[in-house]
Every structure is written in structure tokens, then in C-alpha cells.
Image: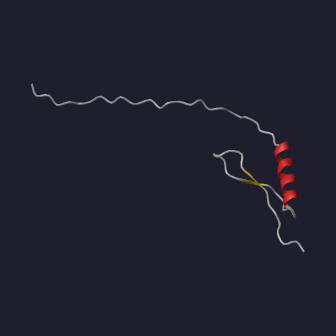
Amino acid sequence: MVKNLYTVWIKIDETLPWIELKGEYRTKSEARKAAKEAIEITRIKIVSIAEKRNPMKALAPLKTNTLT
């Protein structure tokens, strides 16, 4: 009888959430092997790279009341 089943979670970057791989593994070494295999076969495609733009400050005319 198996007491614990292990699941595999992978964290790629701090900005992305954890990714849970499909499957449950009987031993920690099986889970580790599955994680290494998943990382080895992972293909990443860069779709687009956004240019970092600084927002422009809008200049609003100031209305002044002058007494003449």
C-alpha cells in the first residue's frame, strides 16, 4: 500500500505562477525524474517583445487670473 503520492510543481520565473505537471508519482525520485524530463523537453517560443515606453507627461495650460 502506498502512503503518499507525489505531484510535481515547476516554477519558471517569479512573475509566472507555479505549473503543476500531470500525474502522480509513487516515490520522490520518480517525481524528480519526471520534472527533469519535463524541463528537458520544454520548448519556449518568443511571440513578441514589447518595447518599454515611458509615459509622456501631459502639459496642461495653467489659467491664471490677473488683475489689470
Q: Splitting the image into 4 quarters, where does residue 31 fall?
A: bottom right
11 relative to 46, above or below: below
Quadrant in which the C terminus is drawn: top left
In the image, taking residue 42 as reference, residue 64 lies left or right, namely: left
Q: Residue furthest top?
A: 68
The one of 8 and 55 positioned closer to us in this rendering: 8
12 relative to 47, above or below: below
Number of numbered discs? 0
The one of 42 and 45 positioned closer to us in this rendering: 42
Query: Residue 18's spot in the image, x, y percent?
Result: 70, 53
Question: Looking at the image, which residue is at 26% across and 30% down?
Answer: 62
Quadrant in which the N terminus is drawn: bottom right
Query: Residue 60's spot in the image, x, y percent?
Result: 33, 30
In the image, taking residue 67 as reference, residue 8 lies left or right, namely: right
Q: Splitting the image into 4 quarters, where does residue 66 fall?
A: top left
Query: Residue 9's spot in the image, x, y percent?
Result: 75, 55
Question: Looking at the image, which residue is at 65% across and 32% down?
Answer: 49
Question: Looking at the image, which residue is at 67% across and 51% down?
Answer: 17
Query: Residue 35's spot in the image, x, y percent?
Result: 82, 51
Q: Residue furthest right?
A: 1
